[in-house]
């Protein structure tokens, strides 16, 4: 039997015509978040400095893959923010509340330094309403206060950095549990900070992930360990992203591996 | 005048197991599941007890250290082979597949170096205790000390106020983790440490 052609249009195709302007905007926003923008919260409950360090380097790696990045920064203090990690690349960072970095051959990185003291959740939501460019990644760097997360109006993935001692892992578990109460759609990436042995890190993650899977019905994705070495500390000291360094080191390899796994995972998800 | 107490010897293993069980129950909050679960050539489990997510296979020394150790290992193998049966029998008393086993050996005479070597070599966590019994046969008093540095997890004795302090310190009050959840997580972490991770 031959399939007959379909007459008319389905409800899915025409329902936009009958929606109010507010509903249309909500549908448009929802599609926009899903199709164009990856919203990533990066958290390190134990160290704001290493959190900013990862975000800065991840932004440069994404730019290297021709993926545009916006970093939304929301800090009450200036010590250890993205500005201080990449200051050497910014000619006059005091002139604006935002700036762009463009390196030859790479996509644009824009940093928006949001005013502190405002309602963080409302600020992120409001910022999305003016986001009309086809930016691919919005990386959010804020203080690690549980009240700030998650934002139900803005679905997002999370990169959670943690050390592997008892208290840090309990803290990471608590963060994951709290976030999953509000949003179960986002992916959770885990990075183990300051662990030297990659094999040991993998075993700890397997044990930790099985526990989260059993208790919270969520499987986190492991991006790898971040080993600290001399080059990492020097990169922070000279305020230049480590991924731009010419020298090779264990910390740089770890960082590149973390970024590669993250980008591959995000690309696989969106096809 | 100084009076020196000399330890007494109790030959009745069933009586000795009960004295030890009362001690571990009072001191560490261990729940006793049953006595003499396995004996003879199959191995030896004199006391089967649980605490948190751990199951303790306790063995009281009846002869030399090597034989006690061998019977303890055989008892562990019997426990693994008969897990289905044990779950049906003791499931209601707290035994579950989530429990990670720990071998406990109690002896009146233990060599610290031998205990330490066993703990290094074995995949399954081992805890050694030296005991002495004073008093009389009718009113015995037991004295127990851990050998080799591995003891029951102290977090089982944490007080509610300590959990609150921990939540404040880690700034995780909003996550509303209960005391039991924190204990369970700490047990999970303890099993990681037991595997030398």
Image (cartoon, coloured by chain):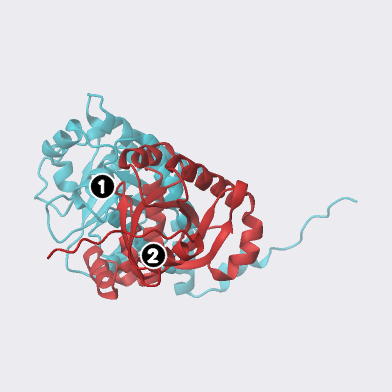
Chain colours: A cyan, B red
- The residue indicated by pointer 1 is A110
Above or below, B133 against A162 in this view is below
Percent across and percent down for residue B82 are: 64, 53
Dot 2 falls on a residue whose secondary structure is: helix
Dot 1 falls on a residue whose secondary structure is: strand
- The one of B57 and B62 positioned closer to us in this rendering: B62
- The residue indicated by pointer 2 is B24
- Left or right relative to B2: residue B46: right
- The one of B87 and B177 positioned closer to us in this rendering: B87
Percent across and percent down for residue A230 are: 17, 32
Q: Chain of mark 1?
A: A
Percent across and percent down for residue B192 are: 40, 49
- Left or right relative to B83: residue A152: left
- The one of B116 and A5 positioned closer to us in this rendering: B116
Tell us which disc is closer to us: 1 or 2.
2
Above or below, B66 against B21 in this view is above
User: Any mark on residue A269, and which?
Assistant: none
Residue A220 seen in the figure: no
**Dot 1 and dot 2 within a common chain:** no
Q: Chain of mark 2?
A: B
Local crowd size for mark 1, using a 10 Å CA cut-off: few (<14), some (14–19), many (≥20)? some
Above or below, A17 against B97 in this view is below
- Per the model, the C-alpha gap separating discs 1 and 2 is 62 Å
- Left or right relative to A39: residue A23: right
Callouts 1 and 2 close, C-beta under 8 Å: no
Residue A235 seen in the figure: yes
Q: Residue at x 29, y 55 (%)?
A: A168
């Amino acid at each position: 039997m031959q399939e007959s052609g379909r007459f008319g249009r389905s409800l899915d195709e025409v329902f936009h015509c009958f929606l109010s302007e507010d509903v249309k905007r909500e549908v448009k926003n929802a599609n926009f978040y899903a199709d164009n923008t990856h919203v990533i919260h990066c958290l390190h409950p134990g160290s704001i400095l290493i959190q900013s360090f990862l975000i800065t380097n991840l932004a440069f790696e994404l730019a290297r893959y021709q993926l545009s990045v916006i970093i939304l920064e929301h800090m009450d203090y200036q010590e250890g923010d993205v500005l201080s990690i990449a200051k050497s690349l910014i000619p006059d960072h005091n002139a604006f509340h935002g700036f762009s970095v463009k390196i030859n051959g790479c996509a644009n990185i824009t940093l928006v330094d949001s005013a502190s003291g405002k309602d963080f959740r409302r600020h992120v939501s409001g910022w999305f309403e003016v986001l009309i460019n086809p930016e691919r990644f919005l990386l959010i760097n804020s203080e690690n206060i549980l009240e700030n997360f998650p934002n139900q109006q803005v679905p997002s993935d999370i990169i959670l950095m943690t050390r592997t001692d008892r208290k840090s892992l309990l803290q990471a578990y608590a963060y994951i549990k709290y976030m999953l109460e509000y949003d179960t759609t986002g992916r959770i990436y885990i990075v183990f900070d300051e662990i030297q042995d990659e094999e040991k890190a993998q075993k700890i993650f397997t044990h930790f992930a099985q526990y989260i899977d059993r208790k919270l019905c969520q499987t986190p994705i492991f991006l790898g360990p971040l080993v600290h070495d001399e080059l990492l500390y020097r990169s922070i000291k000279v305020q230049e992203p480590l991924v731009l360094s010419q020298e090779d080191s264990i910390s740089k390899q770890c960082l590149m591996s973390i970024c590669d796994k993250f980008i591959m995972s995000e690309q696989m998800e969106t096809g | 005048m100084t009076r020196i107490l000399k330890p007494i010897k109790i030959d009745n293993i069933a009586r000795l197991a009960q004295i030890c069980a009362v001690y571990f129950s009072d001191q560490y909050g261990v729940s006793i599941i049953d006595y003499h679960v396995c004996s003879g050539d199959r191995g030896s489990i004199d006391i089967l007890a649980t605490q948190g997510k751990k199951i303790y296979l306790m063995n009281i020394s009846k002869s030399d250290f090597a034989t006690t150790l061998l019977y303890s290992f055989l008892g562990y193998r019997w426990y693994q082979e008969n897990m289905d049966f044990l779950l049906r029998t003791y499931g209601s008393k707290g035994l579950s597949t989530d429990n990670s086993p720990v071998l406990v050996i109690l002896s009146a005479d233990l060599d610290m170096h031998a205990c330490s070597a066993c703990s290094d070599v074995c995949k399954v966590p081992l805890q050694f205790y030296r005991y002495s019994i004073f008093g009389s046969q009718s009113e015995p008093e037991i004295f127990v000390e851990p050998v080799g540095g591995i003891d029951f997890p102290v977090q089982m004795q944490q007080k509610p106020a300590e959990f609150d302090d921990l939540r404040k310190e880690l700034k995780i009050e909003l996550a509303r983790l209960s005391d039991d959840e924190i204990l369970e997580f700490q047990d999970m972490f303890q099993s990681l440490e037991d595997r030398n991770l």
